[in-house]
Structures are given as C-alpha cells and as structure tokens.
Image (cartoon, helix red, strand yellow):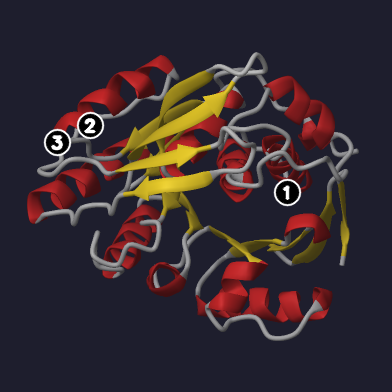
Amino acid sequence: MSAGTDLGPPERGAVCVFAPVTLLTLTLERTPDDVDELHLHPGGQGVWQARMVRTLGARAVLCTPLGGETGLVIEPLLEAEGIEHPRLELSSANTAWIHDRREGERAPLWEGTAPTLGRHDLGELYTATLAAALACGVCVVAGTHETPDVLEPEIYRRLVTDLGASDVRAIVDVTGAELEAALDGAPYLVKVSDEDLRRDGMLKGDGDAAVTRSAEKLRARGAANVLVSRAGAGALALVDDRCLTITAPELEVKDPRGAGDSMTAALGVAVARGLDWDGALQLAAAAGAVNVTRHGSGSGRADAVGQLARRVVVSDA
C-alpha cells in the first residue's frame, strides 16, 4: 500500500474547473412508497467534477457562465453544494435536461442544446479561469458535451498553453477535436476512456498492448502523462517513465454515468495535495468505483473512497 493512498487533511488544496457548459437537470424519481418526486440539480461534466472535488474535502472553484431563468436556479444550487464560482454572466439561458427515472433506468424526456458562447461570454470565462487556476495551481479542463457550436476547439489549445506557461497543472478530460487542440498545448495529464479513444480512431485492437500504444501516441502529441479508463477492465497509465495498470475491486453498478468525471476530479485533488502517482491513481480509481454504486454523478462519500483506495492495486504493466 502506498503512503500516498491517504486522502490528506480536509480542505487541503484547491482545484479550478473550466466548464463551458453547465445545465439544470430535472429528474423524476419514485420513492419506495410509490410517490413521485422531482429533483433539481446543477449538472454537466464540470459540475460533476467539482462535486467530487468537494466530496473529497477540497475546495472546488467552478468557472462557468450562468444566464437566464435556468441560470438563476443553478446558482443557489451550486452554493448549496459548497461549489465556489466567480460570477460570470451568460448572454443566453443555460440549457436543461429532463429525465424520468421512476422505473429505475434513466429515460431522457428532453435534453436542450447548450448555447454558443459569445465573444464577451468567452472572454470572461477565459480570464476568470486563468485567475482561479493561478490561485489553485491545478485546473481540470472539461468539455462541451460534444456540442460543436459552444466554442472553437482552439480555445483548448490556448488555455492549456497559458496554464502551462504559468506553472498551472492542466488535467484535461475532453475528446475529439477538443482533445486534439488540447494536446497541442502540452497538458500535464490527459484522462480519457478507451471508448472515446476508439470512437475517435485513436485506439485499434484490444488488450493492454493496444491501449499502451494509444497512450504513447497521446504522449508523443504533447501530453506529459496519460490515464486511460476501461470500465470493468481497470485503467492503464503512462506517468513519468512508468507504465502502470490500476485495478479496483468490482462494485455493483447502480448508475455508470459520472465515473470518468469522478476519476478526473480525484486526480485534480491528488495533484493539489501532492500525492505520489500510486496514491493519485488509487484515489482516482476508488472515486470512480464509488460513484457508480449510487445515483448522482460526482457523488459519494470521502470515507468510502479513502477506504476503497487502500484496496486498489497499482502495478507495473
């Protein structure tokens, strides 16, 4: 067991999260006594990551624009979760998702499209992210939920480049054209799933050797370190001069959504707290595993994550 497995003191370290898309989720649930309920939560990749950062006891500074009636609802919900956020006005309303989970499985009833960020919106988001990231020293970079018109992928190259030039460690969790652009900025760490790599044509074949080749290509393109998640098959990492496999105990899956974002958030917390690579990867795998045992992306308990992290095996590939 690595000494770095320990979560560290609560509130030690802070993580900035760049989130160009934040949405309002409205979910219909049914209680055990057969009563229908409506649950409202802030959502989106960046929110889920910030939520896990808070779950692990670190400060989360979410840089995301809010506007319209949905934005007015999202803002106090973020504050209720203890997620800090600079006030960034969005010229349009944030989008929303309406889901029905009364029968157990999540069934989308309506999912809106995220608005395009105007020049002023984007400028404020960019500079607010720089300010927060410089203060934190670590920045998790979230994507646009594959909505092509939110912003130009080139923004990811600029942001990652500027963060690196300012000694901020950028942890990138994006795919497609956004990943291609971010790689040109030489990020500190790229976290990606094997499914996304395969969909983007960057993974051919199966098994550890194929995933390792894909991770090596990401490093050749500019990523200093790479973590590839593989759902039930464990994860594989290229960090410093090591190639590692990460295996967590298999827990029964309640809701798989958000596991990858929880891993990314935990990596941000680990870097902010100065954990070694073994400890960081154990924490990431445990956060992802705990997240799938319950409804709610980026949710869990710090004590469960910490205990499970001690049972994650990190070994040379």
Identify the disc placed on residue 71: 2
**In the rendered image of this protein, does residue 159 appear above or below residue 282?**
below
The picture places residue 258, in percent across and down from the top left corner, at 58, 44
Location of the C terminus by quadrant is bottom right
- Considering the numbered disc 1 on the image, is that residue within a helix, a strand or a loop? helix
- What distance separates the C-alpha of mark 3 from that of mark 2? 9 Å
Identify the disc placed on residue 89: 3
Q: Locate residue 129 relative to residue 83 in the image: left or right.
A: left
- What distance separates the C-alpha of mark 1 from that of mark 2? 38 Å
Query: Which quadrant of the view contains residue 295?
Result: top right
The type of residue carrying mark 1 is Trp
Question: Within 10 angstroms of label 1, few (less than 14), some, or many (20 or more) residues?
Answer: many
The type of residue carrying mark 2 is Gly
Disc 3 + disc 2, Cβ < 8 Å: no
**In the rendered image of this protein, does residue 35 appear above or below residue 299?**
above
Q: Which residue is mark 1?
A: 277
From the image, state whether disc 3 or disc 2 is nearer to you: 2
**In the rendered image of this protein, does residue 159 appear above or below residue 196?**
above
- Considering the numbered disc 3 on the image, is that residue within a helix, a strand or a loop? loop
The picture places residue 39, in percent across and down from the top left corner, at 45, 24
The picture places residue 92, in percent across and down from the top left corner, at 13, 44
- Considering the numbered disc 2 on the image, is that residue within a helix, a strand or a loop? helix
Look at the image and tell me whether residue 90 can be seen: yes
